[in-house]
Image (cartoon, grey):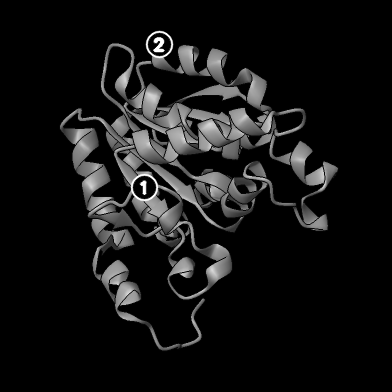
Amino acid sequence: MFEPSALDQIGINRCLNTVGANAFYLMVGSAIVKHEELSVVRMADGERLLFNYCLGGTLPPSMGTDWMQRYGLVGIAKEYLLDKLVQAATTCTYFAPSVSGIHLRNYDVYDMFPRRDRYIDNFFNYAWAEDYKIQLFKTAKRVLFIHANPRTAKAMTERAAKIGVEVVYLQMSKWEQAEEICEKGKLVDAPLVLHSTGPASKWIGAEIARGGNIRKVSLDVGSAADRWTLLSLA
């Protein structure tokens, strides 16, 4: 990712049209304060491989049964998966394709979906400092967390309570749960939503953000979910 390489003009334009992590933090904070709808979906090499698989390609051995189980994809039909990948990438307020894809073809998901004028740096979920996350929690006062592991949710809930923030947890571990979790999520009046739902279910982020009694900020934190458990408050 960080080894310098020569970029063509398309790559330079993609860099120029990508909102950096710090600027995006200001946008997210503003949306929470102003009670505005905001959703972001991140995609990278995994989604690229799944997208091509849906179109007739093959998956590498590393994405076998164990990987499919881990990401809640066992038993999913290719047509359904493709539809949900497209829905996730096109209905979110902001799309965050891997910036690694600017110069590494295996990570390039830019051309899989309709072009946008602006993108978000997909590494924001790793780049934001602990203080950034704590301030977002404090501003929201109530957080909805969607994730497979209840132990991760327990850690977040207990630490957030130390700063007066309530965490509402919805457990989700497979694609079949998406519709139900989406409807439940809409009913939770939490201004901030953090979800790690697997490639087939990222689409629920945008739906939850615009549904319910209040507009929400919905962030696809993916595999960085453990970094959002407010580790400094342990």
Q: Residue furthest left?
A: 34
Residue located beneath label 2 in the image: 187
Q: Residue furthest front?
A: 56
Say what amino acid the circle numbered 2 marks. Leu
Q: Are marks 1 and 2 in contact (CB under 8 Å)?
A: no
Residue drawn where x is 33% and y is 55% of the image: 120
Res. 65 mark: none
Say what amino acid the circle numbered 1 marks. Phe
Q: Nearer the viewer, residue 126 or 54?
A: 54
- Disc 1: CA contacts within 10 A as few (<14), some (14-19) or many (>=20): many
Residue drawn where x is 52% and y is 76% of the image: 1
Of the two numbered discs 1 and 2 in the rendering, the one whose residue sits closer to the viewer: 1
Please say if 223 is above or below 203.
below
Query: Where does the image place residue 208, in percent across and percent down from the top left?
Result: 39, 22
The answer to whether residue 220 is visible is yes
Q: In which image quadrant can residue 68 be found? A: top right
Query: Where does the image place residue 196, in percent across and percent down from the top left?
Result: 56, 38
Say left or right for 25 vs 182: left
Q: In which image quadrant can residue 136 be found? A: top left
Helix, strand or loop at label 1? It is: strand
Q: Nearer the viewer, residue 168 or 125?
A: 125
Say left or right for 22 vs 186: left
- Disc 2: CA contacts within 10 A as few (<14), some (14-19) or many (>=20): few
Say left or right for 20 vs 200: left
Query: Where does the image place residue 232, in percent across and percent down from the top left?
Result: 50, 52
Res. 95 mark: 1
Helix, strand or loop at label 2? It is: loop
